[in-house]
Amino acid sequence: MAEWNVLDIEKPIGELDKQIEEIKRYSIEHSEDHSKDVEILEFQRDELLKKVFGNLSTWDRVLLARHPKRPYTLDYVRMLLDDYLEIHGDRLYADDNAMVCGIGKISGRKIAFVGQQKGRDLKDRQLRNFGSSKPEGYRKAMRVMKLAEKFNRPVICFVDTPAADCSVGSESRGISEAIARNMMEMSMLKCPVISIVIGEGGSGGAIGIAVANKVLMLENSIYSVIPPEGCASILWRDKTKASDAAEALKITAFHALELEVIDEVVNEPLGAAHRNAEETAKNIRNSLVKWIDVLSGMSRDELVSQRQDRFRNLGKFIEL
C-alpha cells in the first residue's frame, strides 16, 4: 500500500485501505470473488473519510498543507498543461531549483507559469532547498513574467513555500530586494496574473509571486505572514502551542476568503489532494480557465488598475 497515511487523523483510514488492498490481492492470487467484502470495507472507509474530513481543525489543515504526498507545482504542471517548456536561469547569477518557470498551454490557452517546488525525497528536497526560493529564483520568475507580458500571455503562479530562503548567501545577494521588486513589478504587469496557493503560502516568500489579479487557494492550503510554530515561539516562547497560534492567525483558505484576502477556494476531493491528485488538478483547471477567460476580456490598463486596487483595498480598519 502507498504509505500516504502519515497523519494521526489518517491512520484509521489507512488501516481500512490496507485491508482492502490485501483482500484484492488475495482474490487475484487465489482466483476467488471477494467483491462484497471489498464493497463493505470501501463503504466504511468512505464514511470514515466524511466524518474525519468534515471536522478538520485549523491545525489539521496546516498538517495537510504540508503533507509529504501532497502534489507539488510540477505535478500540477504535468497534469494541467497540454505541453510545456521549462525555462531556467535569471540571466544574472544562477538557476534556482526551488522556483520553476516556463510556458505552456492549458485547455488550448497559451500561458506562462511560475511556482515554488518542494522536494519529494531527501536528495530532491536538498536540490529544491525545501521549496524556499533564493533571490535568483524570484528574478527568474520576474524574467518569465516579463516575457509573458511581452507576448500578452496570462501568468499562473503556484504558491507553495514555508518562506523565502534566509541564508547568508541569499541575504548577501538581496533576497528582500528581490521580493520587493517582484511585488512592485507584478503590480504593473500588463497581462492577466492568477496566483493559487497549493500548499503553504508562507510570508514574503509567497507574496513574491502572489501580487495577482485573482488569488485562489486550495481547500487545505494555508496563507500566513509567519508559520504557526514561529508565532507560538514569539508570543508564548513555546512552539508546542503552534495549534493555538494557527487558530489565532486565521490562516486557512476559508479564513482568507472570509477576510477577502483571496477570491476563491478551490475544492479538494474527499481525503485531500494527495488521495486524488487528478481530481484536484481538474478542479484547479476549471477555476484557472474561468478566470483566464474573465481577465482576458479586460484591457491591459484595466488589468493593472484592477490588480492595484485589489491590494490597496486589503485589510479593514475598526475604530474603537
Image: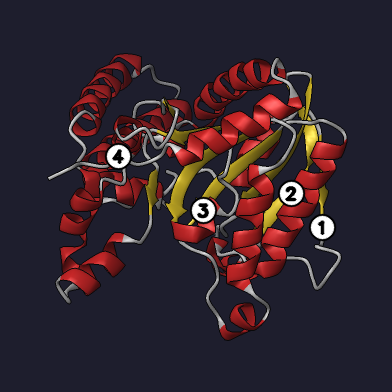
Q: CA distance from mark 4 to mark 2?
A: 34 Å
- Residue 60 in view of the camera: yes
Element carrying mark 1? loop
The residue identified by callout 2 is 101
- Compute the Cα span from label 4 to label 3: 21 Å
Cα separation between marks 3 and 2: 15 Å
Mark 4 vs mark 3, foreground winner is 4
Residue placed under numbered mark 3 in the picture: 206
Locate residue 97 relative to residue 26 in the image: left or right. Answer: right
Counting residues from the N terminus, which is met first, the one under dot 1 or under dot 4? Answer: 1
> Is the C terminus in the top left, top right, bottom left or bottom right quadrant?
top left
Q: Residue at x 38, y 33 (%)?
A: 219
Question: How far apart are the two marked residues, 2 and 1, measured between alpha carbons?
Answer: 7 Å
Residue 114 at x, y = what percent? 68, 46
Q: Which residue is mark 1?
A: 88
Between residues 180 and 77, which one lies in front from this camera angle? 180
Where is mark 4, residue-wise?
A: 316
